[in-house]
Image: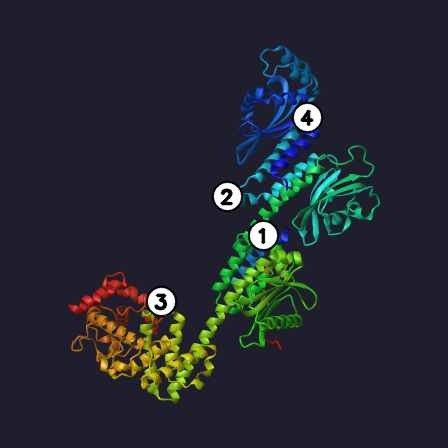
Amino acid sequence: METMEDIVREVLDVYADSAGLSVILFEPSGEGYLGIAIRDPFTRAIFERFEQYSPTWRDAFAAASGLRATTVCDFWIPGLKFIVSPIRLDGQPAGQLYAGPLLDVGGAERVYRQLVVSADSPVRSSETASAVRALRELPQDEIDGLRDSIDRLARIVCLLLDGREEGRTESAVAAESATTMTTVEAVLDQYLQMDSAFDLSGFAALTAPGVYSVIRSYGRDAHKLTNIAFKEGEGFLGQAVLSSTQLRWREVVGDSRSAQFAEQGLPPIGEIVCYPVRFGNETLGVAFGLRYAGRTGGSGPSPWESLFYPVIHAALCASILNGRLRKQVQRLQAVTEVGRFLVEADDPQRVLFTLVDASLSLVWTPTFSLLVLFGESGGKAQLVSRGLDAAHAQRYAKEVASRLRAAEGAQRSFREGAAIRSTPWGDTALECVLAFNGVLVGALSVAVGGELEAGECESYVAALTMIGSAVIHASRQRSEQSGQTSEIVRLLHRMTRWRDETLYERAVKAGELLQRFLPAEDVAPREASLILHACMLAAMEPEELCPIGSHYAEIAAMLEERRELERAISSGSYRTDAYSRGAELIEAALRMADDAEMSVDHAGVPVDEDVVGREETFYGRKLRSYLQKSRVVMEEFLLTDEADPQAGDTSERDGPGGGSDYTDQRGIDRLAREAGLSKREREVLALVVRAYSNKDIASTLYISEHTVKNHMTNIFAKLGISDRAQAMALVFSKSVE
Amino acid sequence: MNETQDDMSLQLECTLFFERNPYALETVRGLAKKLGRSELALEAVVERMSRLLILERIGEGERAIYTYHAPAVRQELDLS
C-alpha cells in the first residue's frame, strides 16, 4: 500500500500537470523538499543547480516563513511570482508549498531585463533568462484562481501529512477522532470541488445495513441529489457498491438504471464513473461523477481519477478506525454503566429486565429480545421477552433450551460469546449463552438485521451477557445460601421440639466455640460456614438432612467423617492426617461442650489435661490451646470480682450481654457508673472489649448496626475517647485499680 | 455509521434511567434535563423505545409523557 508521502507526491504531480505550474513542497527547515513536480524551464534550471541556488532558496524560504495564508509573492526579482502557502500542523510549521513561476501582464519583459541586466540578480544566467522567455503572462483573475487552487491543495497536503503522523499519544488520537469524519469530508470536498471534469459529483455512504445515502454532492444541480438513498444492487450506484474496482458506464441515456437520477429532475445522464470505497471486505460508500448527455468539452478521464481512489481510501481507513474506536469506547462505557447497575440491583427481576432492554439498545435493527433462564432443577425455565407474542417466545425458548441442553449433555463447557442463529420463523438473531464458570444458566437472544450487523454488535451483546451471567450466578448463590440457612434453622427447630433438647444445647455451645476459633485460624468464610452448619446439625441423622439441597452433600460428608473420627478415637486408631479439619474441629468442639466446666464458661477450658488425655485430636489440641490463651487474655482485661458489692443489680443479668458472661466485670461496671453509661451502652462496651465487630454486636444484642454505631458514638463521648483501643485500655485500667 | 448507531449509547443511557426509575413519568424535556442531553437527540431515542414497547407514550406532541413498560414474563415454562 502506498504511504501518505507517496500520495502527497502524487497529488503534487497531478496538480502540476493540471495547472502547468511547478509545485514544490519544502521541509520545515527549508533545507530540502518533501515533494517536487517541475513543469517549467525556469524552475528546472534552478533545481538542476540546486547547490548553487540553495542559499537563495533559503533566503526566500526564511522571508516567507512568517506567512499565515496563501500569498502570491515576488520571488527574488520584482515581477517573478510564486504562490506560497504555509503548511502548519498543530500550529507548528510543517513546510511551505511553492507553485510557480507566474508572470503578471507586462511582467515578462521587466523580469527578463532584470535577469540579464541587473548585476544584483541572484539567479542571473543565460539559462534562467531564456527560461523566463518561455513563461507566459497571466491576467490577475487567473492568478487569483490559481492562488485559490493552491490554497485548497495546501489544505489537502496538511490533511494528508497530519494523517501520516505516527506515534501520537492516545489522547491526541482521541481528540482528533472527534473531527475525523470532518477531515474525510474536507478531503472529499477539496477533491470534488477541484475536479471540473464532471457536471455533478458526490459521495454516498453506508447509512444502514445494505442502504446508502448521498451525503455530499457538488455541481450546479447538487441540491437535487440531497437525500437520495439506494440499496445494494439498485441502479448504477447500487451496482457500484457491490464492485471492488472503479466502474465507468458510457452512453447510458435511456438506461433504466439511471432512473434514480431522472426521478430527481436531473438532465439525462451520458456517462457515470463510480469509485467504490472499501475497507477490508466492507463497502463504506461510493464516490461518483456524472456527465450529462450531450456535454461538449471536458469529457474523458478526470486528471484526479488516478489518485482519487488511493487518497479517499487512505483517508477513509484512518477515519473508520478512529471513528469506530471512539464509538466502541462510548458504547463500552455505556455497557459498563449497565454492568454497574446490574451488580448493584437488589431485585433479580430487574436484572433480567435490564438485560433484555439493554440488549435492544446494542443492535441496529432490534425487533425482539428474549431471555431464557433455566431453573435450577432443570425442566423449567423463566422467560422474559420483548417484541414477541407468547406463542413465538415459548416456541423459540424451547428450541434454544433443547439445543443448549443437548450441548450440555455432550459435556461442552459453555463460554461467553455470541453466535448468529436463525429463529424458528426465519429471522436472524444474535444468541449469547448465559454461563458462569462453564455452568449453563440460560441464553439471551436479540434480533439483528443480518450478518454485518451481528458482527458489529456481537462484542457489546457478549459483554452485556457476560456481566449478566455473573450477576445471575451470584444472585442464585445468595438465594441458595439463604434457603439453606432457613432449612437449617427449620431442622434445628424441629430437633428442639422432637428430640433431646440437650443435644441442641450441646451443638449450640460447640458452635459458639468454633465461631471464636475459626476466624483466628484464618478459615475461609465458605469453609467456616460449612463447618458451623455441620456442627449445628451434628446430632441429626443423615436421612433427616435431605432437605438442605446441594449443600447437604458436603455437610453430610463432613458429618460422616466426624462419626468415623469418633469411632477411631474410641478404638484408639486415630491418625493425625486421616481426617479433614472440619471433622476434627466439630468433634473437638462437641467434646469440649460436653465438659461440665465448659458448660459453665465458654471462655474457659479444662486445665486438667487428664480430662481429655490421649484422646485429643490434632485440631482438638489447637482449639484447646487457643481457648486457654484467650481465657488468659480476657482475664487480664476483665478481672472477675463476684464479691464486689457494686457489681450491678440482678436485673442487669437478664439481657444479652448482661448475663453471667458479662456482668461480673468490675472494670466495665465501674466505668459505666462513673461515666453514666446506660444499661445498653454498658452492654455494648462489654462486647467492644471482647473485640466484637459492630456487626457481631448488632447480632448479639438483636439491634441494627446503625444503632450500635449510635451507642458507640455516645460511649466515646461520655468516656472522652475516640476509638475502641482507648475503650479497652480504659476498661483494663479500671479493672486493675 | 448512521444516526441509529450513534444513538445507541444514548438509548442505553435512557434505558438505564427507566430501569432505575421504573415508575417515572417523563416528557422529552424532563428526560433531557435529567440526563443532561439535548431534546432533539432524545426525541428520536424515546420514539424508537416506544416502538420497541420499552416505553409507553401517553399523549401526543411536546406534552407526550413516557413511562416504562415492563417486558413480558413467563414463569415456570415447562421445557419438555
Q: Are marks 2 and 1 on the same chain?
A: no
Tag 3, which chain?
A: A
Of mark 4 and mark 2, the one earlier in the sequence is: 4
Judged from the image, the secondary structure of the residue bearing numbered disc 1 is helix
Question: Label 1 near label 2: C-beta < 8 Å?
Answer: no
Query: Residue A169, labelled with which disc?
Result: 2
- Residue A134 appears left or right of A527: right
Label 2 amino acid? Thr
Q: Nearer the viewer, mark 3 or mark 2?
A: 2
Task: Tell me where residue A253 sits by quadrant.
Answer: top right
Task: Tell me where residue A611 sits by quadrant.
Answer: bottom left
Question: Label 3 near label 4: C-beta < 8 Å?
Answer: no
Does residue A362 show up?
no
Residue at image mark 3: A706
Q: Nearer the viewer, residue A287 or A673?
A: A287
Q: Residues within 10 Å of mark 2 (few under 14, many from 20)?
A: few
Inter-mark Cα distance, 4 to 2:
40 Å
Label 1 amino acid? Glu
Judged from the image, the secondary structure of the residue bearing numbered disc 3 is helix
What quarter of the picture does the C terminus of chain B occupy?
Answer: bottom right
Label 3 amino acid? His
Tag 1, which chain?
A: B
Q: Residues within 10 Å of mark 4 (few under 14, many from 20)?
A: some
Residue at image mark 1: B39
Residue at image mark 4: A39
Tag 2, which chain?
A: A
Label 4 amino acid? Arg
